[in-house]
Amino acid sequence: MAAEIISEVRDGVGWVTMSNPARRNALSTAMLASLATTVRDFDTASPVRTIVLRGAGETFTAGADISEFAAHHDSAGARETWEQALTGLFETLSGLTTPLIAMIQGPCIGAGMALALSADIRVAAEGSKFAIPAARLGIGYPYELAQTLVHVVGPANASEMLFTARTYTDTEALAAGLINRLVPAPALEPDVLRTASAIAANAPLAVRAAKASIKAAAHPALAPRAQQLIASTTGSHDEFEGQRAFMERRPPSFEGR
Protein backbone atom coordinates (compact mmCIF):
# COMPACT_ATOMS: atom_id res chain seq x y z
CA MET A 1 0.00 0.00 0.00
CA ALA A 2 1.21 3.51 -0.83
CA ALA A 3 2.25 5.98 1.84
CA GLU A 4 -0.46 8.62 2.06
CA ILE A 5 -2.49 11.01 4.18
CA ILE A 6 -6.18 10.07 4.33
CA SER A 7 -8.78 12.63 5.36
CA GLU A 8 -12.53 12.79 5.88
CA VAL A 9 -15.06 15.00 7.67
CA ARG A 10 -17.84 13.61 9.83
CA ASP A 11 -20.22 15.73 11.93
CA GLY A 12 -17.86 18.67 12.32
CA VAL A 13 -14.79 16.52 13.02
CA GLY A 14 -11.94 16.36 10.51
CA TRP A 15 -10.15 13.00 10.66
CA VAL A 16 -6.56 12.90 9.38
CA THR A 17 -4.84 9.51 9.10
CA MET A 18 -1.13 8.95 8.50
CA SER A 19 -0.90 5.74 6.49
CA ASN A 20 2.36 4.00 5.62
CA PRO A 21 1.70 0.48 6.94
CA ALA A 22 4.85 -1.09 5.53
CA ARG A 23 6.98 1.27 7.63
CA ARG A 24 4.88 1.75 10.78
CA ASN A 25 3.40 4.96 9.37
CA ALA A 26 6.84 6.55 9.03
CA LEU A 27 6.55 9.97 7.42
CA SER A 28 7.91 10.56 3.92
CA THR A 29 8.55 14.04 2.51
CA ALA A 30 5.38 13.79 0.43
CA MET A 31 3.35 12.76 3.48
CA LEU A 32 4.64 15.75 5.46
CA ALA A 33 3.62 18.14 2.70
CA SER A 34 0.22 16.46 2.30
CA LEU A 35 -0.37 16.53 6.04
CA ALA A 36 0.38 20.27 6.18
CA THR A 37 -2.01 20.94 3.30
CA THR A 38 -4.76 18.81 4.81
CA VAL A 39 -4.77 20.40 8.26
CA ARG A 40 -4.46 23.87 6.71
CA ASP A 41 -7.52 23.20 4.56
CA PHE A 42 -9.44 21.83 7.54
CA ASP A 43 -8.53 24.92 9.57
CA THR A 44 -10.28 27.15 7.05
CA ALA A 45 -13.23 24.85 6.32
CA SER A 46 -16.32 25.98 8.20
CA PRO A 47 -17.76 22.45 8.65
CA VAL A 48 -14.61 21.40 10.54
CA ARG A 49 -14.62 22.40 14.21
CA THR A 50 -12.16 19.83 15.56
CA ILE A 51 -9.27 17.96 13.92
CA VAL A 52 -8.18 14.46 14.97
CA LEU A 53 -4.73 13.21 13.94
CA ARG A 54 -4.11 9.46 14.05
CA GLY A 55 -2.05 6.68 12.49
CA ALA A 56 -3.43 3.82 10.42
CA GLY A 57 -3.67 0.46 12.17
CA GLU A 58 -1.94 0.04 15.52
CA THR A 59 0.84 2.62 15.16
CA PHE A 60 0.72 6.40 15.50
CA THR A 61 3.98 6.99 13.63
CA ALA A 62 7.57 5.77 13.96
CA GLY A 63 8.90 9.16 12.81
CA ALA A 64 10.94 9.81 9.67
CA ASP A 65 10.84 7.39 6.76
CA ILE A 66 14.62 6.95 6.63
CA SER A 67 14.32 4.51 3.73
CA GLU A 68 13.59 7.58 1.62
CA PHE A 69 17.07 8.94 2.36
CA ALA A 70 18.77 5.68 1.44
CA ALA A 71 16.89 5.56 -1.85
CA HIS A 72 18.49 8.81 -3.03
CA HIS A 73 22.04 9.12 -4.29
CA ASP A 74 22.25 12.43 -2.43
CA SER A 75 21.04 11.18 0.96
CA ALA A 76 22.11 14.39 2.74
CA GLY A 77 20.09 16.44 0.27
CA ALA A 78 17.09 14.15 0.67
CA ARG A 79 17.26 14.52 4.44
CA GLU A 80 17.50 18.30 4.13
CA THR A 81 14.41 18.32 1.91
CA TRP A 82 12.57 16.14 4.47
CA GLU A 83 13.57 18.47 7.31
CA GLN A 84 12.35 21.49 5.36
CA ALA A 85 9.01 19.77 4.84
CA LEU A 86 8.86 18.97 8.56
CA THR A 87 9.58 22.60 9.45
CA GLY A 88 6.79 23.70 7.13
CA LEU A 89 4.40 21.26 8.77
CA PHE A 90 5.19 22.53 12.26
CA GLU A 91 4.74 26.12 11.11
CA THR A 92 1.29 25.13 9.87
CA LEU A 93 0.44 23.32 13.11
CA SER A 94 1.60 26.24 15.25
CA GLY A 95 -0.76 28.54 13.36
CA LEU A 96 -3.86 26.35 13.63
CA THR A 97 -6.89 28.01 15.19
CA THR A 98 -8.95 24.79 15.20
CA PRO A 99 -8.48 22.43 18.19
CA LEU A 100 -6.25 19.47 17.35
CA ILE A 101 -6.48 16.08 19.09
CA ALA A 102 -3.76 13.44 18.78
CA MET A 103 -5.23 9.93 18.90
CA ILE A 104 -2.24 7.75 19.79
CA GLN A 105 -1.92 4.01 19.53
CA GLY A 106 1.32 2.01 19.49
CA PRO A 107 4.72 3.62 18.83
CA CYS A 108 4.89 7.42 18.94
CA ILE A 109 8.53 8.08 18.18
CA GLY A 110 10.76 10.99 17.14
CA ALA A 111 8.89 13.22 14.72
CA GLY A 112 5.73 11.41 15.83
CA MET A 113 6.29 12.70 19.37
CA ALA A 114 6.76 16.20 18.01
CA LEU A 115 3.48 15.90 16.10
CA ALA A 116 1.67 14.68 19.20
CA LEU A 117 3.10 17.55 21.24
CA SER A 118 1.73 19.98 18.66
CA ALA A 119 -1.79 18.82 19.51
CA ASP A 120 -3.94 20.54 22.11
CA ILE A 121 -5.15 17.24 23.58
CA ARG A 122 -3.47 13.82 23.50
CA VAL A 123 -5.33 10.58 24.19
CA ALA A 124 -3.45 7.27 24.05
CA ALA A 125 -4.33 3.59 24.00
CA GLU A 126 -2.85 1.25 26.56
CA GLY A 127 0.38 -0.22 25.27
CA SER A 128 1.49 2.93 23.45
CA LYS A 129 5.18 3.82 23.62
CA PHE A 130 6.88 7.20 23.44
CA ALA A 131 10.46 8.28 22.71
CA ILE A 132 12.59 11.14 21.44
CA PRO A 133 15.78 9.31 20.34
CA ALA A 134 17.65 12.39 19.08
CA ALA A 135 20.59 12.07 21.52
CA ARG A 136 21.01 8.39 20.70
CA LEU A 137 21.19 9.28 17.01
CA GLY A 138 23.61 12.18 17.48
CA ILE A 139 20.99 14.75 16.46
CA GLY A 140 20.49 18.11 18.16
CA TYR A 141 16.82 18.33 19.05
CA PRO A 142 15.34 21.53 17.49
CA TYR A 143 15.01 24.47 19.87
CA GLU A 144 11.35 25.18 19.08
CA LEU A 145 10.39 21.54 19.67
CA ALA A 146 12.31 21.49 22.95
CA GLN A 147 10.37 24.58 24.02
CA THR A 148 7.10 22.81 23.31
CA LEU A 149 8.23 19.73 25.23
CA VAL A 150 9.20 21.85 28.27
CA HIS A 151 5.84 23.63 28.14
CA VAL A 152 3.98 20.29 28.14
CA VAL A 153 5.96 18.24 30.68
CA GLY A 154 8.16 20.73 32.53
CA PRO A 155 11.96 21.09 32.48
CA ALA A 156 12.76 18.10 34.69
CA ASN A 157 10.75 15.60 32.64
CA ALA A 158 11.98 17.18 29.40
CA SER A 159 15.57 16.81 30.61
CA GLU A 160 15.15 13.11 31.35
CA MET A 161 13.44 12.43 28.02
CA LEU A 162 16.03 14.25 25.92
CA PHE A 163 19.13 13.26 27.90
CA THR A 164 18.35 9.54 28.19
CA ALA A 165 16.52 9.14 24.84
CA ARG A 166 14.81 6.14 26.41
CA THR A 167 11.39 4.78 25.56
CA TYR A 168 8.55 5.69 27.94
CA THR A 169 5.72 3.30 28.70
CA ASP A 170 2.10 4.36 28.53
CA THR A 171 1.84 4.87 32.29
CA GLU A 172 5.12 6.80 32.42
CA ALA A 173 3.85 9.09 29.66
CA LEU A 174 0.64 9.70 31.60
CA ALA A 175 2.56 10.46 34.81
CA ALA A 176 4.87 12.86 32.96
CA GLY A 177 1.95 14.77 31.44
CA LEU A 178 2.71 13.74 27.86
CA ILE A 179 -0.87 12.54 27.42
CA ASN A 180 -4.22 13.66 28.84
CA ARG A 181 -5.71 10.19 29.15
CA LEU A 182 -4.83 6.54 28.81
CA VAL A 183 -7.65 4.22 27.73
CA PRO A 184 -8.02 0.58 26.65
CA ALA A 185 -7.33 0.20 22.93
CA PRO A 186 -10.96 -0.69 22.01
CA ALA A 187 -12.14 2.48 23.78
CA LEU A 188 -9.66 4.83 22.08
CA GLU A 189 -11.69 5.97 19.07
CA PRO A 190 -14.99 6.26 21.00
CA ASP A 191 -13.22 8.29 23.71
CA VAL A 192 -11.62 10.63 21.17
CA LEU A 193 -14.89 10.94 19.26
CA ARG A 194 -16.73 11.99 22.44
CA THR A 195 -14.15 14.69 23.12
CA ALA A 196 -14.03 15.89 19.51
CA SER A 197 -17.84 15.95 19.30
CA ALA A 198 -18.12 17.92 22.54
CA ILE A 199 -15.73 20.53 21.15
CA ALA A 200 -17.50 20.61 17.78
CA ALA A 201 -20.83 21.23 19.52
CA ASN A 202 -19.55 24.40 21.23
CA ALA A 203 -19.33 27.90 19.79
CA PRO A 204 -16.40 27.97 17.31
CA LEU A 205 -15.49 31.60 18.05
CA ALA A 206 -15.33 30.91 21.78
CA VAL A 207 -13.29 27.73 21.32
CA ARG A 208 -10.79 29.46 19.04
CA ALA A 209 -10.49 32.34 21.50
CA ALA A 210 -9.80 29.84 24.28
CA LYS A 211 -7.12 28.11 22.18
CA ALA A 212 -5.46 31.44 21.44
CA SER A 213 -5.45 32.36 25.14
CA ILE A 214 -3.86 29.03 26.09
CA LYS A 215 -1.14 29.50 23.46
CA ALA A 216 -0.53 33.05 24.68
CA ALA A 217 0.12 31.72 28.18
CA ALA A 218 3.31 30.13 26.79
CA HIS A 219 4.03 32.85 24.23
CA PRO A 220 3.00 36.28 25.62
CA ALA A 221 3.58 37.97 22.26
CA LEU A 222 0.40 36.20 21.09
CA ALA A 223 -1.74 37.88 23.77
CA PRO A 224 -3.06 40.70 21.52
CA ARG A 225 -4.41 38.14 19.05
CA ALA A 226 -6.07 36.25 21.90
CA GLN A 227 -7.67 39.45 23.17
CA GLN A 228 -8.91 40.19 19.67
CA LEU A 229 -10.54 36.78 19.35
CA ILE A 230 -12.13 37.09 22.79
CA ALA A 231 -13.56 40.47 21.82
CA SER A 232 -14.98 38.99 18.60
CA THR A 233 -17.35 36.81 20.63
CA THR A 234 -19.09 39.85 22.14
CA GLY A 235 -22.30 40.58 20.29
CA SER A 236 -21.81 37.63 17.97
CA HIS A 237 -24.64 35.50 16.63
CA ASP A 238 -23.35 32.56 18.66
CA GLU A 239 -23.33 34.56 21.90
CA PHE A 240 -27.00 35.35 21.50
CA GLU A 241 -27.77 31.80 20.37
CA GLY A 242 -26.03 30.36 23.44
CA GLN A 243 -28.04 32.60 25.75
CA ARG A 244 -31.31 31.85 23.99
CA ALA A 245 -30.66 28.13 24.05
CA PHE A 246 -29.88 28.31 27.77
CA MET A 247 -33.10 30.20 28.51
CA GLU A 248 -35.14 27.88 26.29
CA ARG A 249 -33.54 24.75 27.79
CA ARG A 250 -32.42 23.36 24.44
CA PRO A 251 -29.09 22.50 22.80
CA PRO A 252 -27.58 25.52 21.03
CA SER A 253 -27.02 25.57 17.27
CA PHE A 254 -23.85 27.53 16.69
CA GLU A 255 -22.78 28.91 13.30
CA GLY A 256 -19.34 30.29 14.04
CA ARG A 257 -20.29 33.93 13.58
Image (tube, rainbow, N blue to C red):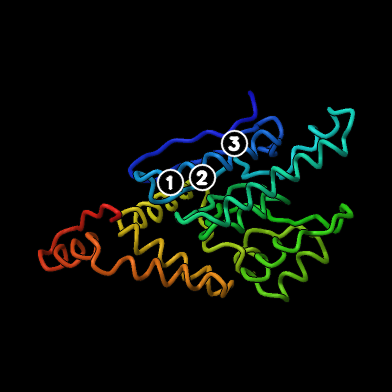
Q: Is residue 216 left or right of residue 160?
A: left
Numbered circles on residues, count: 3
Q: Is 2 left, or right, of 73 in this rendering?
A: left
Disc 3 residue crowd, few under 14, some 14–19, many 20+, Cα 10 Å: some
Say if mark 2 contacts mark 1, CB within 8 Å: yes
SS at badge 2:
helix
Q: Secondary structure at mark 1?
A: loop
The secondary structure type at the circle numbered 3 is: helix
Question: Percent x, y for residue 206?
Answer: 34, 64
6 or 84: which is nearer to us?
84
Q: Quadrant of residue 26?
A: top right
Q: CA distance from mark 1 to mark 3?
A: 16 Å
Give the amino acid type for the residue marked by disc 3 in the picture. Ser
Q: Which mark is residue 34?
A: 3
On screen, residue 214 above or below 38: below
Give the residue at x 40% y 43%. 45
Q: CA distance from mark 2 to mark 1?
A: 7 Å
* Label 3 vs 2, first from the N-terminus: 3
The answer to which of marks 1 and 3 sits earlier in the sequence is: 3
**Identity of the residue drawn at 43% across and 53% down:** 191
> Which residue is at the front of the view, 243 or 158?
243
The residue nearer to you, when weighing 193 against 244, is 244
Residue 22 vertical placement versus 168 (above, below) = above
Residue designated by label 1 = 44
